Image: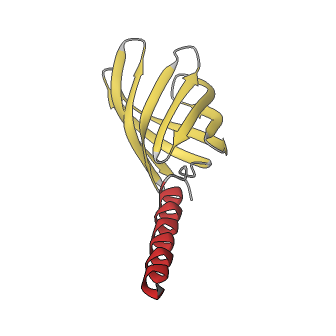
Amino acid sequence: MKNRGLAVGLVGRALLLVLVVGVAAAADANVAGSWNVKVSGDAGTADQKIDLTQDGNKIGGTFKGPRQSGTIEGTVDGNNIKFRVKAFVPIDYVGTVDGDSMKGTLSGRGKTGDWTATRVK
């Protein structure tokens, strides 16, 4: 009977550990701050700047590019990021976050490209 109680206790602790690790892995990446963005694609190359705020998985902020500026609305889900620049020419960004860097693809007005971003220290 003692061994059965020990086994149940160990199984319970193992399940708790799995739950804690699973919750930690599901936490949304922190993207708040200023970022330097480089884009390349159908429309050429450009340097952009974004300033992001974050409330849980929702993100907002501002965008400044060489030809337009606007606001940002989007989400973070784990290390996945998706946001839209609301400007004269709206641009949709999809990508992944890895600490102080991000990368992905973008699209706007029928054109596509790639982007990388580095957090300003």
On screen, residue 88 above or below 68: above
Q: Residue 85, position in %: x, y? A: 56, 25
Write the residue at 48% across / 39% down: 81
Q: Residue 115, position in %: x, y? A: 38, 37
Q: Nearer the viewer, residue 36 or 20?
A: 20
Which residue is the extreme one toward the front? 1
Write the residue at 53% across / 30% down: 83
Which residue is the extreme one toward the bottom? 2
Write the residue at 30% across / 21% down: 42
Q: Does residue 5 appear to the left or right of 42 in the view shown? A: right
Q: Does residue 8 appear to the left or right of 88 in the view shown? A: left
Q: Residue 40, position in %: x, y? A: 33, 31
Q: Nearer the viewer, residue 99 or 115?
A: 99
Write the residue at 43% across / 78% down: 7
Q: How many labels sit on residues?
A: 0
Q: Quarter holding the C terminus?
A: bottom right
Q: Nearer the viewer, residue 14 or 38?
A: 14
Q: How is the image coloured?
A: secondary structure
On screen, residue 1 above or below 18: below
Q: Does residue 47 appear to the left or right of 33 in the view shown? A: left
Which residue is the extreme one toward the left? 42
Q: Residue 37, position in %: x, y? A: 46, 41
On screen, residue 108 above or below 82: above
Instruction: Tell me if I can see residue 43 in this picture.
Output: no
Instruction: Tell me if I can see residue 27 in this picture.
Output: yes
Quarter occupied by residue 49? top right
